[in-house]
Each structure stands twice: as structure tokens, then as C-alpha cells.
Image (spheres, grey):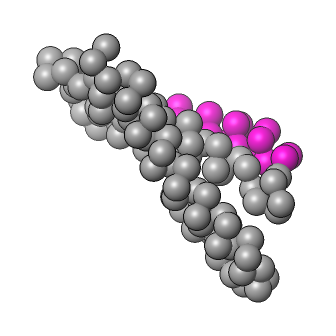
Amino acid sequence: MIYLFIGIGGALGASLRFYFSNFISQFSLFGIPLGTMMVNLIGCFIVGFFIANQEEGNSFFLNNFFVIGFLGSFTTFSAFTKEALIFYNNENFFTLLIYIFLTLTLCLFSTYLGFKIFQNG
């Protein structure tokens, strides 16, 4: 049953990421693809929320369906690394460094922010 929860959550998360990322990818900031960055920021914020609100009895469904399945496929480290490699191959090192720095810093901050905002109810 756990695999079913994770699989359904994963299918929904991947589908929403594809739609959302393609829509946002119409926009860029100094050549940085915003679609991947935005899905990762949103997913990290929501993970912070779940970390802050974990309860023993309710965590099985939410952790397996939503965090592992849905958010695991909604966020995308592989697309981030693919885009970083494209910057590297195009010798666009400044944009590469900015992209890596912004993604990592903002995603960590987003998780922390989601945690702090929703901590203790």
C-alpha cells in the first residue's frame, strides 16, 4: 500500500511540475531558468511546513504520499543539475555560479522559512 501512495503522489507531483515549470520557464532572470528554481523553492517551503508539523499518528500518509511521492517528484534536482551543466558547457560561468548560489541559498532559506512560519501550529 505504501508504494501505491508514493506512486500516486509521484505521478501527481511530476505532472504538476511539468505544467508549472513549462509555464514559468517563459520567464528568465539574467538568463537563469525560473521554472526549475520556482518549483524547487515552493517544494522546499512546503517541506519546511511538514517538518514543523510532523505528528506521530498522521505522518504515514502525509510523509509517503505527499513528501516522498508528490514533493519528491514536484521538486527536481536533476533538472537543476542539467541546467547548470548547460551553463558550464556554454562557458557561461558567471551565470552558472549565480544560478547555483541562488538555488542552493534560496532553497535552504525557503525550507527554513516554511519551518519557522508553521512551527508550533
Q: How many marks?
A: 0
At 42% from the left edge and 24% from the top edge, which residue is drawn? 117
Q: Quadrant of residue 66?
A: top left
Q: Quadrant of residue 49?
A: top left
Indicate the position of residue 50 as horizontal and vertical percent values.
34, 28
Indicate the position of residue 2 as horizontal and vertical percent values.
25, 33
Residue 23 is one of the magenta-drawn residues: yes
Residue 9 seen: no
Please say if 48 is above or below 55.
below
Residue 81 seen: yes
Report the predominant secondary structure element of the magenta stretch. Answer: helix
At 38% from the left edge and 22% from the top edge, which residue is drawn? 118
Indicate the position of residue 38 as horizontal and vertical percent values.
65, 43
Which sits in the foreground, 49 or 57? 49
At 53% from the left edge and 31% from the top edge, which residue is drawn? 12
Q: Which residues are magenta?
A: 11-27
Q: Quadrant of residue 97?
A: bottom right
Q: Is residue 7 left or right of residue 52?
A: right
On-image quarter of the N terminus? top left
Please say if 120 is above or below 11.
above
